[in-house]
Amino acid sequence: MEEKKKKIGFNIIKSDPTDGHKGFGKGALSLDNVSPVIIDVEAGEAEIDIGAMHARSAVEKGIKFLPNKEEVPNGKPYWLVWVTIDRKEEGPYYAGVTACYMTVDREIRRGYKSLPVHVNRMDKSLKRHIIVDEMDAKSKKVLADFLRAHNEVLWNNSSDELKESLTNL
C-alpha cells in the first residue's frame, strides 16, 4: 500500500517582525522565509523537506556525515538547495537560491557533506544570493522546473540572474 506524502509548501513570508519595534531586531535575518529543497540527482526529483533546516531531512536521517568525499565512495548524490522567498513591488519572488552538494550511502549509513558550506550557503540564500554554478545541468533543470511548477508567479517575478543560471545550459 502506497503511503500518501504530505505536500509541503515553501515557507511564506510573514508580516515584518520588526513592525512596531522601533529598531529592535532590525536587520536581523529571519529563517521564516527560507526553505530547503532536496534534489535526488539520479532520480531527477526535487521536494521540499523542512527537516533539512536542522539536518533532519528524510535523506539525512540516520546518516553519520563525514567531511571527506573519499570516505563515502558509493554515496548517492544529492543537492540541498536553500530557497529564500522575498517580496518586492511586483510581488513575491525567489530571492536567494544556493545549492550545496552531499552524498549518502544508506547501506553503510554514512554520507559526505561540508557543514561549513551548508551553513554559509543558507546564510548566502538569506542574503539574496544566487549560487547554483556547481550544479550539474540535469539538476539545474530539475530545480528550474520545480520552482516554476511550485509557483509560476514567484518564478516570473524572480531575477533574470536566477532564470539564466538555471536554464541557459
Image: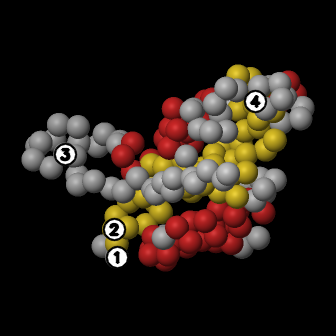
Colour scheme shown? secondary structure
Q: Secondary structure at mark 3?
A: loop
Q: Nearer the viewer, residue 105 or 78?
A: 105
Q: Secondary structure at mark 1?
A: loop
Q: Earlier in the sequence, mark 3 or mark 4?
A: 3
Tally the marks: 4
Mark 1 lies on residue: 90
Q: Position of residue 40 (x, y in %)?
A: 73, 51
Mark 2 lies on residue: 88
Identify the amino acid type marked 1. Answer: Glu
The answer to whether mark 2 and mark 1 are in CB contact below 8 A is yes
Q: CA distance from mark 1 to mark 4?
A: 41 Å
Q: Secondary structure at mark 2?
A: strand
Residue drawn at x 57%, y 53% as measured from the top left: 5
Mark 3 lies on residue: 18
Q: CA distance from mark 4 to mark 2?
A: 38 Å
Mark 4 lies on residue: 111
Q: Earlier in the sequence, mark 1 or mark 4?
A: 1
Identify the amino acid type marked 2. Answer: Lys
Observer able to see residue 124: no
Q: Quadrant of the C terminus?
A: bottom right
Q: Nearer the viewer, residue 138 or 157?
A: 138
Q: Nearer the viewer, residue 102 or 58?
A: 58
Q: Position of residue 7 (x, y in %)?
A: 51, 56
